[in-house]
């Protein structure tokens, strides 16, 4: 258990209170107990301070009067909490060795301290940087290159000829580099278009569990440095995800769409193919993105849930909307209001 | 092939007809042949009875006059069918032994009759209850605890420190306990928040194929007893799914959202984070749940499909809805109707 | 590197220019370099011809005057490109042998030239046709039958009793034949209905990465010949996908729904259960299909993204639509317009 003073030093934060106070773990304001460290990241949560049982709190120096106990002060408490989480991290650590029960082809190139766990399969021509960790049962296809300190979790499948940068994590059962969905409509059915290009993930990229990133047909599918992608996301062939963009669970990006930097794509958003999305675009949950977005900003689509009977009426009226607009225009004409209706009426 | 009398006894149902009649299998009303048992679960399907070729039927005693042949009577025919399905079950059975080609760490604790199939990997510190079955190529992370009679199917990945109750099934390629999607926005990019908590599944929980349930950041992600979750569902970190709640395929529950008991969440529903959903809430398919639901009942959102050209007009008008409402209000003012418009007009 | 003349002969296309010109690879119009072959599939892309650096172009004979260089002429340039992609294919090839580190049960029936890679598990009773390729770590359940030239990619799980035709591909981490989501609501919770039927995939079927196709309860789930299914798609138990139908990523088809032939189902479409979809139906992205579609044609649902504040107003008004329609009707009555309103007003 680290002492509060040790934490303050490690996190480079100002300490108020007992530097020898020992912290057992991090916790939320609500669940913290006496030997826990908690944090307040937003002003609206200050009210909870009076009820927390935490032994110490990370908070903004401006809020110091709200909390009489042990404190670590940070201008950015949420980032301080993120950094503290690393100190309390309890994940298993890599063995730094190749398990004899892994299936590793001849001629694989290793950096120093590489870990390959039991049942993992690494094909010929693969290059693994220093301290790369290939989890149990993961698959690394021919000629794939993985940068230093990258972790491929159990069950993930990386197909042939994929390039993954440094410090990435690919979570379990993700699939990187499977064939893009490319078929030409022939007279006797679909004709497969072989997907000749690959996938390139930059440095510091996170890929969620069971996410799929397809290889390109003629141009690589690219995820740029620092992008973070959640679970069950689909990235189509030839798409490009900009630097530091975040994509939440179950979003789908169709082929050849290019998303700019620092975008936030919420859960279950769907994007059509061949679009261009500007930098700093935020799309709300389930957003239906059917055309390019050229301006930074927040966008949303969809309708809110209603009680079933009310919704049935709304949904039915939705199909009559054009008729309703025309009737309003007609009434306006009668009333001498004659407004321009914007579209076609 | 069980005789009808044997089935009646096993299912504790009243029999009409020939107790020695042998049943080869269960079938639908439409596809049943002469040695099949079928069922009628709802009154609206009674009309199909005259055309079925089935040799025997499970049905409600009130409907006995509709069917002259062999019958098993049940107040709840659908439940009787469910119980009969167990008798005709044809799934492979567990070997009850540890395959020598499995990768099992030292010090794993086993109950009686545990099965671990070839290529499965069980890490150190794991505890497996009686008759647990770990399928081929599945992965069980360090210190995970799995209750008796639970089955982990091939390719599923259970990360470290997960707790799974008794009589659960985790279907193939599901991922339980991967890191939640937690990152703090730093000046030079996303800073990972280590996910320190775990996942707890209660007893009798079903997890579908390729579903992902993330581990918590500071508090466990929890699925309570008897909840059933379909394929490709995302359950975010720190979320809680109440007892006996059913979640259909491709639904997504964001982090820290708490769903009550006995809810029914249809396919592709999306829920934002930090919401509270009451008990006995039903959400229709693709429902967009952006705020908490405090009352039991049925809710829905979205719009129905229309032929493309008609839809294009509806969708375009949707973006003009506020203007349309204001124009109606203006017309009403002119007409001296001056109704209160509900919102802002 | 094939010469252009060789390509012309292999693809049965008319050649203009130098038959000895060597082609290093296929490329897009934009990215092609001097030793690349590119193509123009649609008239609207002809304008890019003047800027391409490609050494040769596949294009329609009608467009020959637009391009002075080396050319291959095709009435269907996109199909010619698809066929050319096979010539330049760079995927790893099967070894044609059973890896000693695969886990293969006794009594499996093999055709000629079968490949089973390391860590794959093939259970008893399985039949594999000529040249079938089971990738590393894939799982083939008891009694499953796989037709000739079919490839099961790494990490895919095929459960027991599944039938897969010839020339299919099942991409990584897909799950075929897991239990359908069938439960009866009992007084003490959900009662599992054993899923007694299987899954049948026809010939020339493509299944995307991490896609799930559930086994049937009483009737098989069927994907007919030549259907192509993208990543992360859910096909529920007892559903049927017609011949040559294409289903894009993250679409979900609920149980017992039958989709006709040659349909195109876009990404994230959701279909309720027990529906019938006619042949040649196209559903746009995120389409909400809650009832059967009896006519061929293009359908869509949903609303377009708007800037957040504008969308909030539209979404709020959506819940007032029925009231708005009634107010229009009242105004019309006052104005003596008294139109029939279509629904209830």
Image: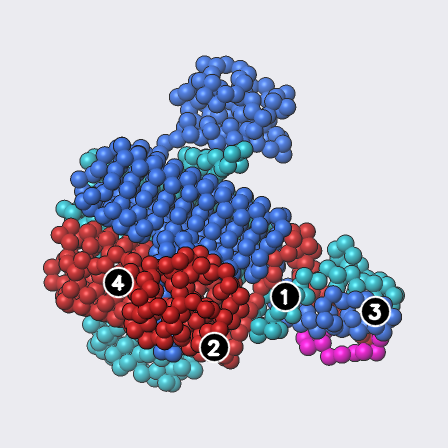
Chain colours: A blue, B cyan, C red
Question: Label 4 is found on which chain of the structure?
Answer: C
Residue B152 placement, left or right of B64: left
Q: Residue at x 86, y 71 (%)?
A: A335
Asked if both marks, 2 and 3, belong to the same chain, the answer given is: no
| CA separation in Å, label 1 and label 2 | 39 Å
Q: Secondary structure at mark 3?
A: loop
Question: Label 3 is found on which chain of the structure?
Answer: A
Residue pointed to by mark 2: C62
| CA separation in Å, label 1 and label 4 | 43 Å
| CA separation in Å, label 4 and label 3 | 65 Å
Residue pointed to by mark 3: A338
| CA separation in Å, label 2 and label 3 | 50 Å
- The one nearer the camera, B201 or A83, is A83
Please report the bounds of the magenta region as a residue range: C334-345
Question: Label 2 is found on which chain of the structure?
Answer: C
Q: Secondary structure at mark 4?
A: strand
Q: Position of residue B70 (x, y in %)?
A: 30, 79
Residue pointed to by mark 1: B315
Residue pointed to by mark 4: C151
Q: Residue at x 53, y 74 (%)?
A: C298
Asked if both marks, 4 and 2, belong to the same chain, the answer given is: yes
Of label 4 and label 2, which has the lower sequence position?
2
Q: Position of residue A63 (x, y in %)?
A: 63, 24
Question: Does residue B274 appear anywhere in the picture?
Answer: yes
| CA separation in Å, label 4 and label 2 | 39 Å
Q: Position of residue C293 (x, y in %)?
A: 50, 76
Question: Does residue C176 appear anywhere in the picture?
Answer: no
Q: Name the quarter where the N terminus of chain C is drawn.
A: bottom left
């Amino acid at each position: 258990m680290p002492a509060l003073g040790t934490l303050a030093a490690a996190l480079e934060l100002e300490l108020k209170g007992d530097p020898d106070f020992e912290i057992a773990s991090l916790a939320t304001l609500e669940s913290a107990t006496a030997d826990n460290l908690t944090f307040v990241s937003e002003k609206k949560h200050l009210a909870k301070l009076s009820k927390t049982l935490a032994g110490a709190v990370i908070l903004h120096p401006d809020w110091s009067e709200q909390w009489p106990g042990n404190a670590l002060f940070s201008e950015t408490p949420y980032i301080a909490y993120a950094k503290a989480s690393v100190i309390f991290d309890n994940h298993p650590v890599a063995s730094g060795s190749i398990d004899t029960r892994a299936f590793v082809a001849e001629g694989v190139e290793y950096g120093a301290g590489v870990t390959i766990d039991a049942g993992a399969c690494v094909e010929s021509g693969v290059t693994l940087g220093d301290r790369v960790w290939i989890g149990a049962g993961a698959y690394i296809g021919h000629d794939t290159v993985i940068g230093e300190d990258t972790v491929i979790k159990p069950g993930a499948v990386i197909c042939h000829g994929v390039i993954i940068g440094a410090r990435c994590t690919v979570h379990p059962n993700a699939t990187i580099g499977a064939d893009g969905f490319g078929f030409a409509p022939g007279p006797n059915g679909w004709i497969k278009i072989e997907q000749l290009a690959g996938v390139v993930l930059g440095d510091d990229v996170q890929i969620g569990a069971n996410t799929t990133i397809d290889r390109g047909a003629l141009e690589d599918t690219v995820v740029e440095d620092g992008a973070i992608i959640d679970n069950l996301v689909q990235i189509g062939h030839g798409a490009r995800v900009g630097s530091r963009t975040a994509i939440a669970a179950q979003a789908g990006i169709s082929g050849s769409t290019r998303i700019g930097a620092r975008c936030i794509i919420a859960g279950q958003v769907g994007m059509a193919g061949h679009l261009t999305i500007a930098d700093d675009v935020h799309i709300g949950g389930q957003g239906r993105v059917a055309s390019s977005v050229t301006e930074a900003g927040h966008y949303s689509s969809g309708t809110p849930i209603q009680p079933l009977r009310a919704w049935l009426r709304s949904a039915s009226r939705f199909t009559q909307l054009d008729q309703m607009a025309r009737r309003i225009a007609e009434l306006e004409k009668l009333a001498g209001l004659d407004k321009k209706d914007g579209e076609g009426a």
